[in-house]
Amino acid sequence: MQDMTPRTLYITLAALVIGCVPASDAKEPPKGAPASKGGPREVAVLAAGCFWGVEAWMAKAPGIVDIEVGYAGGEAKTTSYEQVSSGATGFAEAVRITFDPSVVSYEQLLAQWFFRIHDPTTKNRQGNDEGPQYRSAIFPQTDAQRASAQKVVAKADESHLWSAPITTTIEPSRSWVKAEDYHQDYLVKHPGGYDNHYLRELTLRL
């Protein structure tokens, strides 16, 4: 894996707003390189709108071992989809990604994928989905991840590639609550269950 930290890297991104409604056609990115067997493992927790679409698109990143959808950002030890949907719990719909850092770094996962699959400028909203449960948020699991997240968010904001300021928050890693079984692999079970509101090419300098 090439280290992106000491050099300037130009990354082609596609900003995609995802919603939990029937789909129109979307450009399908190629499946990334697989994780190494028995290799190192790291966890990323990210929120970018409806977790159905986030799970489906992040699964195509290189080095992905496993993805679970759930709720992050709240204080409670348990919650439910109905409670989170009220917007009053502090939780966001999110994904918990286990990945191989020897294949893809945390910075690359954020810069090349996280910012690619949603609009990071619409506060508490993705497409037709509105409320704090649909916010753009990163939940670093370590101090190193927090530093990487701060770097990527700052560079994204400085890039002025979006017409509005970045609203993505970097939040403490609080409770993780796994979502109900019917939400897991939702778009595998129900192909086409997301909406591609827009797709545009961006180049983010890091």
Image (cartoon, rainbow, N blue to C red):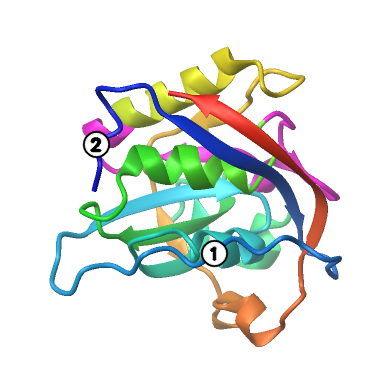
What amino acid is found at the position of numbered circle 2 in the picture?
Asp
Residue furthest bottom as drawn:
189
Q: Residue at x 25, y 41 (%)?
A: 2
Visible in this render: residue 140? no
Identify the disc placed on residue 30: 1
Q: Which residues are magenta?
A: 121-146
Measuring 56% from the left and 78% from the top, which residue is drawn there?
A: 185
Q: Which residue is mark 2?
A: 3
Residue 111 to residue 27: above or below? above
| Circle 1: residue type | Pro
- Give the image quarter of residue 177: bottom left
Q: Which percent across, then down, holds residue 77? A: 42, 58
Horizontal side of residue 12 vs 84, given as left or right: left
Q: Is residue 27 above or below residue 112?
A: below
Q: Is residue 100 left or right of residue 66?
A: left
Q: Earlier in the sequence, mark 2 or mark 1?
A: 2
> Badge 2 local density, few (<14 within 10 Å), some, or many (20+)?
few
Which of the numbered marks, if any, corresponds to residue 83? Answer: none
Residue 179 lies, in percent from the top left, at: 53, 70
In space, the residues marked 2 and 1 are separated at their CA atoms by 21 Å
Q: Residues within 10 Å of mark 1 (few under 14, many from 20)?
A: few
Left or right: residue 165 versus residue 96 is right
| Residue at the image point whose x is 13% and y is 72% from the top | 38
